[in-house]
Amino acid sequence: MSSGRIDRYERTNRSFWDADADAYQAAHAETLRGRTWGVWDVAEDDVGAIGAVAGLDVLELGCGAAQWAIALAADGGRVVALDQSRAQLAHARDAVASSGLPVTLVCASAVSTPFTDRSFDLVMCDHGAMSFCDPYATVPEVARLLRPDGRLVFSQATPWYYLTWDEARERVSRRLHRPYFGIRAFDSGEGTVDFQLGYGEWIRLFGTHGFVVDDLVELRAPRHARTTFGDFDARWARRWPAEQIWKVRLATRI
């Protein structure tokens, strides 16, 4: 997971997900169920990151097969699910049709969406576009899309997951392998470019675009946790957070 270039990352990520969508959905179907967070399948009812969505306009960024979007529509949200991968959206189209729920699917980049200003009350993703797009592009775009007091809620891997990744062993370790300061883009080693910031930099970026932080939930692997995502180590994630959920709110316009 060496530091990578930021330019052209969207083309790289789109190509990866178009090629990998079928295998990804088949491999992780038991984990990707909607209303559960991250690789450990932590229930939203236990986390309380999203809350009630009935009557809200909701956007999922990087929806994959739209499992979350379908679950939120079932809870009464007016949901739009966006992804830049047509192959992932093919899975989403089938899933939405099977559900019978009114989820609108959109093929577009999360950094330049086709929606008008102040279209949504909630923007969310679970290891979606907020992990695979430059935060310096996504955060201002989300600020444009949200109504006053609207919320952005998203999960991603933590900085510690990237900083302790041992490239030789292809796993997380108990040692730091790269510097914390200046982190931004990482070559995942699997074909994607992933993005991450230090905590202070995230907070400053949120503040610049009118967000206040409501909470940062550091997910801990449950006891006897299992996952279909082989890059994650349950024993490691019992001691250190491998995933986190940011909950921020658009308090003002700048």
Image (spheres, grey):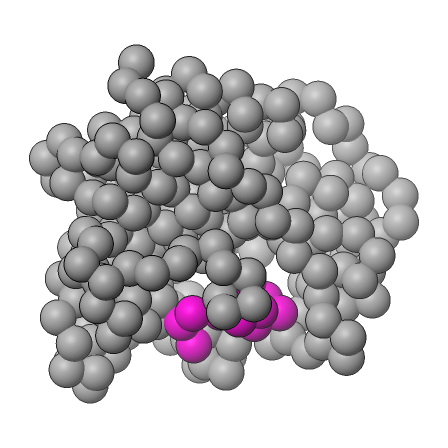
**Which residue is depicted at the point 45% across and 20% down?**
207
Q: Residue at x 37, y 21 (%)?
A: 210
Q: Residue 60, relative to residue 95: is it above or below?
A: above
Residue 122 pos. (x, y %): 29, 47
**In the rendered image, which quarter is residue 94 located in?**
bottom left
Q: Main secondary structure of the magenta part?
A: loop
- Quarter of the image for residue 104 reads bottom left
Q: Which residues are magenta?
A: 33-43
Residue 117 as seen in the image, left or right of residue 52: left
Q: Position of residue 228 (x, y in %)?
A: 60, 76
- In the foreground, 155 or 1: 155
User: Residue 37, percent across and down?
Assistant: 52, 64
Does residue 4 appear in this view? no
Lateral position of residue 203 relative to residue 238, left or right: left
Give the position of the C terminus as an image quadrant: top left
Q: Is residue 128 above or below residue 101?
A: above
In the orientation shown, which residue stands out farthest toward the right? 174
Residues 150 and 174: in front is: 150
- Nearest the viewer among 177 and 41 is 41
